[in-house]
């Protein structure tokens, strides 16, 4: 992995998309995430909104945009669940910020790096979720880390397929 | 100063957004009386608004996806699948192909009919008012076992209404939106339902665990609980009516936190992961069909007529009894006193002997023309001293009219006893 200057990478490799993509892709990911458990049952070991957050944060390479997108998607997820609004929001806010910050420094076109990043950021998102729920809110929550590992693996595999598909929507000069 | 904000604008934005969410979270949590934090059961207006926005955005695509899925299944079952069958059976006669095509279509109709019949049968079995609904989406979160149904305020649904299927209970409505409702499944960690084991009659609270499995918590270790035992709703939670199937006991494990308690793992009766049609119980009041209501009205009418007839009969018998010559001695003292108190001592009866509160009237005895020793009233009284205990009632014997005959003048027995030796040869 080659470490490059932040400004250089920002100027050279900022991915731009049509405005519709910024709105539709997260929405489709949320709808699919809400619908897939009906198809796959308890084996829905993916978190599509997280993958989309990571993708746009890595592509835009803007921590502010990554933060805002992560917060919006996370709050949306919370609104669909019965949890307090903000639990997923905080987790995905942090993930969006970190992904964008990392994207400035490393080459995110590499498949191995994409897989590894998605795996690590998925686990980080789960850890932040657990921290907020148990420590910040002081609520009881049973937790199964094995399931979270499965979800992280699932996210990595989905990212392998989804990232190239979303790359096709880029605006190329 | 300006350069500080520009230089650290990324971190500042992150901190501001995180802080805003933390403050928002703090406003949604309350400390309970037991000292534990709990989420507000009812969302505030702001939180509800956010949920409404999210639901409004997601529900239409979910409905579209759900409809598309049904359409694809329909097309597959009715066209593509049958085309494949036809290709595999090219050598068969065209008549058979046509029959199979019709058979498949009928089979689909029959399945749908069976499913509807099962639901109708369930409605008839449990006579509650229910509304059928379709499950259209979920929360999409591993930690939140909720799903959405396509009925909301437009169908007069309200929070805390029970959601069931023909197999068993599913959950309860948590939030109601204009055209959809959010249902909290029974396998969620925050869910709770009162249940009872059918055979052992042990009660407990049903909830979900981290893996979305059902478990009954708060039960003391009991060897009688065996796998396979049926679990039913207890009816004490004011959500689920009593006696609805929940599932069967899968296994019993010891509570890791409390050694004296066990957790009973339950295999749900309803397919919680594959829900399509559900029923929302909108009323727990018994509902009768028109025929049943007619039967009840007829029964009440018949009962009323019978009661009136019995009353008329009693009245007639009382009138007849008044008209018939009485058997009671109008000169006899009142036979009983209210409350069954002791009567004054009568001749031939020990003083203080209790008499029944409702003693029947003593028969009127005609005067004896030729009294002998068998005539009533000729028994020696305690005053004579010949048979001291003869006139005393036996212990425990209930006083009867025969034991208290009408007293005769005391001179007669004496004269009779005196005349007795004269009759001897």
Image (tube, grey):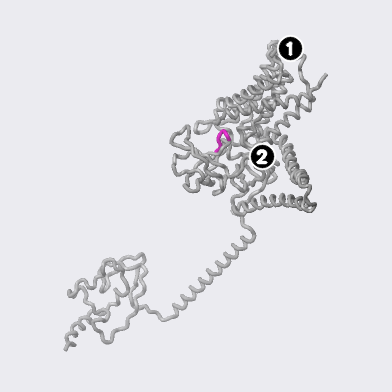
Give whichever of B68, B372 is nearer the camera.
Answer: B68
Whether residue B344 sits left or right of residue A106 in the image: it is left
Q: Quadrant of residue A29?
A: top right
Of all chains, the one bearing label 2 is B
Assign the N terminus of chain B to one quadrant of the image. Answer: top right
Magenta-span inclusion, residue B208: yes
Find residue B89 and name its label.
Answer: none
Position of the C terminus of chain B by quadrant: bottom left
Q: Which residue bears the numbered disc 1?
A: A7
Q: CA distance from mark 2 to mark 1?
A: 46 Å
Discs 2 and 1 lie in a common subunit:
no
Q: Position of residue A63 (x, y in %)?
A: 70, 18
Taking the spot 17% from the left edge, 87% from the top edge, the residue there is B424
**Residue B281 place in picture, x, y as percent:** 62, 47
Image: magenta residue range: B207-211
Relative to A64, B346 lies left or right: left
Query: Label for residue B148?
Result: 2
- Pointer 2 and pointer 1: residues touching (CB < 8 Å)? no
Chain identifier of the residue bearing label 1 in the image = A
- Per the image, label 2 sits on a secondary structure element best described as strand
In the structure shown, which secondary structural element does the residue marked by tag 1 occupy? helix
- For label 1, count other residues whose C-alpha is less than 10 Å away and answer few (under 14), some (14-19) or many (20+): few
């Amino acid at each position: 992995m080659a470490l490059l200057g932040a400004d250089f990478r920002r100027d050279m490799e900022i991915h731009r998309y049509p405005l519709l993509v910024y709105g539709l892709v997260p929405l489709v990911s949320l709808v699919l995430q809400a619908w897939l458990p009906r198809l796959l049952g308890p084996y829905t070991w993916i978190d599509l909104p997280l993958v989309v957050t990571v993708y746009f944060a890595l592509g835009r390479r803007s921590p502010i945009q990554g933060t805002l997108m992560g917060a919006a998607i996370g709050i949306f997820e919370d609104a669909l669940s019965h949890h307090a609004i903000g639990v997923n929001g905080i987790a995905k806010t942090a993930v969006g910020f970190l992904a964008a910050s990392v994207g400035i420094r490393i080459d995110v076109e590499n498949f191995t790096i994409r897989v590894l990043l998605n795996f690590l950021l998925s686990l980080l998102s789960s850890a932040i979720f657990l921290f907020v729920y148990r420590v910040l809110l002081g609520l009881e929550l049973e937790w199964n880390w094995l399931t979270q590992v499965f979800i992280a693996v699932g996210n990595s595999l989905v990212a392998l397929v989804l990232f190239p598909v979303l790359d096709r929507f880029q605006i190329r000069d | 100063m300006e350069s500080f904000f520009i230089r650290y604008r990324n971190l500042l934005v992150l901190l501001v957004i995180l802080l805003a969410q933390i403050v928002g979270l703090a406003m949604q949590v309350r400390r309970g009386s037991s000292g534990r934090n709990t989420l507000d059961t009812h969302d505030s207006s702001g939180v509800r608004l956010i949920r409404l926005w999210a639901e409004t955005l997601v529900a239409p695509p979910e409905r579209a996806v759900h409809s598309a899925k049904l359409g694809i299944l329909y097309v597959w079952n009715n066209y593509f699948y049958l085309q494949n069958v036809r290709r595999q059976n090219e050598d068969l006669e065209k008549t058979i192909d046509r029959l199979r095509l019709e058979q498949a279509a009928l089979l689909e109709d029959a399945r749908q009919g069976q499913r509807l019949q099962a639901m109708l049968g369930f409605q008839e079995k449990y006579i509650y008012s229910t509304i059928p609904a379709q499950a259209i989406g979920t929360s999409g979160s591993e930690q939140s076992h909720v799903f959405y149904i396509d009925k909301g305020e437009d169908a007069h649904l309200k929070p805390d209404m029970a959601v069931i299927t023909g197999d068993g209970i599913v959950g309860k409505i948590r939030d109601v939106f204009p055209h959809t409702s959010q249902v909290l499944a029974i396998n969620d960690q925050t869910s709770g339902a009162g249940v009872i084991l059918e055979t052992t009659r042990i009660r407990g609270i049903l909830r979900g665990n981290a893996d979305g499995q059902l478990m009954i918590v708060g039960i003391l270790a009991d060897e009688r609980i065996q796998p396979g035992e049926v679990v039913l709703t207890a009816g004490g939670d004011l959500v689920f009516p009593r006696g609805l199937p929940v599932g069967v006991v899968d296994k019993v494990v010891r509570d890791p936190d409390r050694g004296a308690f066990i957790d009973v793992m339950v295999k749900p009766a309803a397919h919680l992961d594959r829900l399509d049609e559900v029923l929302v119980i909108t009323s727990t009041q018994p509902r009768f069909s028109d025929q049943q209501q007619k039967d009840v009205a007829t029964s009440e009418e018949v009962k009323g007529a019978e009661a009136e007839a019995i009353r008329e009969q009693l009245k007639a018998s009382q009138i007849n009894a008044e008209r018939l010559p009485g058997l009671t001695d109008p000169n006899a003292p009142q036979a009983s006193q209210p409350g069954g108190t002791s009567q004054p001592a009568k001749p031939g009866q020990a003083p203080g002997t209790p008499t029944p509160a409702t003693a029947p009237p003593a028969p009127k005895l005609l005067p004896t023309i030729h009294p002998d020793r068998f005539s009533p009233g000729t028994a020696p009284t305690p005053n004579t001293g010949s048979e001291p205990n003869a006139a005393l009632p036996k212990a425990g014997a209930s006083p009867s009219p025969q034991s208290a005959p009408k007293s005769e003048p005391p001179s007669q027995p004496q004269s009779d006893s005196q005349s007795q030796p004269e009759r001897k040869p």
